[in-house]
Image: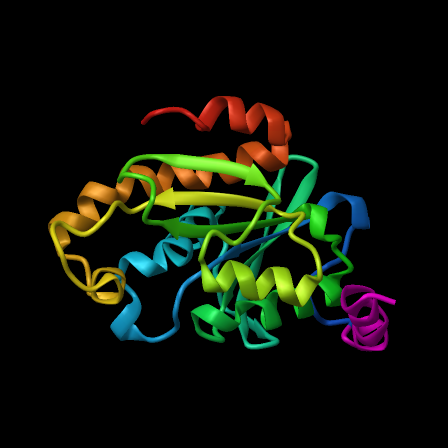
Amino acid sequence: MSRFARLFERFRPVRARDSGDISRGPEEQRWLVAGLGNPGEQYRRSRHNAGFMVARRLASKSGAELSRRKFNGIYAEIHLDSVSAILLMPQTFYNRSGECVVAMLGYFKIPSERLIVVHDEMDLRIGQLRIKRGGSDAGNRDVRSIIESLDTPEFVRVRVGIGHREGAGDDINYLLKPLTDEEITAMEAIFDRAADAVMAVIRQGLERAMNLYNQRA
């Protein structure tokens, strides 16, 4: 039995006991959208928290509040037409998000095919998005953590372009340094577009969403 399957079994009794939690509809109508980032006010405005910013944008667009806590994550439920999605911001720091993601999938019995991971991507310029399913982690340690925790790479990724640093320098500093007000304003459009891309995957399917958003911005 895979690690993912074992987690399904592990969380079944907990799910039955916690009747006061989120209302649960049919399994086939629920997705998990995990926006990646680092917890803490010092990282709130960093490029590495693009996934968190998109998750917050999705919550705002849907009138939801990211306030519930479970498995070292902050989450909320949103409804998109006839389907629902759990929005998740793991609080386990960037290279350990797989622990939180796999626990939430197991608890809510959501298969990895209906997992959407939103994360920053330095290899895309600011304003670009790329949607894909599967593939390698491309050096992203948090995506690697999720792949290893799930024992599969077969989930959807929404990659949010943050561009490269200018000139020689430290990638970590570029990723973690707080954005200025001007930089935040300049990136508002891509956060909105990434949120719309996530909703397109859920509402219209992966292929249609890729056709719409995997283009030059």
Q: Identify the residue at horizontal 71%, vertical 61% (top origin).
A: 151
Q: Identify the residue at horizontal 59%, vertical 62% (top origin).
A: 146
Q: Identify the residue at horizontal 66%, vertical 67% (top origin).
A: 149
Q: Quadrant of residue 189?
A: top left
State the residue in front, 28 or 24.
Answer: 28
Q: Is residue 215 left or right of residue 69?
A: left
Q: Quadrant of residue 179?
A: bottom left
Q: Is residue 176 left or right of residue 81?
A: left
What is the x, y in percent for residue 96?
Answer: 52, 73
- Name the quarter where the C terminus is drawn: top left
Q: Identify the residue at horizontal 35%, vertical 60% (top origin).
A: 49
State the residue in front, 48 or 24.
Answer: 48
Q: Is residue 116 left or right of residue 9?
A: left
The magenta region covers: 1-18
What is the x, y in percent for residue 123?
Answer: 34, 44
- Name the quarter where the N terminus is drawn: bottom right
- Asked whether residue 9 is drawn in magenta, I would say yes
What is the x, y in percent for residue 131?
Answer: 51, 37
Question: Which residue is the extreme one toward the front?
Answer: 168
Magenta residues, dominant SS class = helix
State the residue in front, 184 or 136.
Answer: 136
What is the x, y in percent for residue 113?
Answer: 71, 46
- Asked whether residue 191 is drawn in magenta, I would say no
Q: How many marks?
A: 0
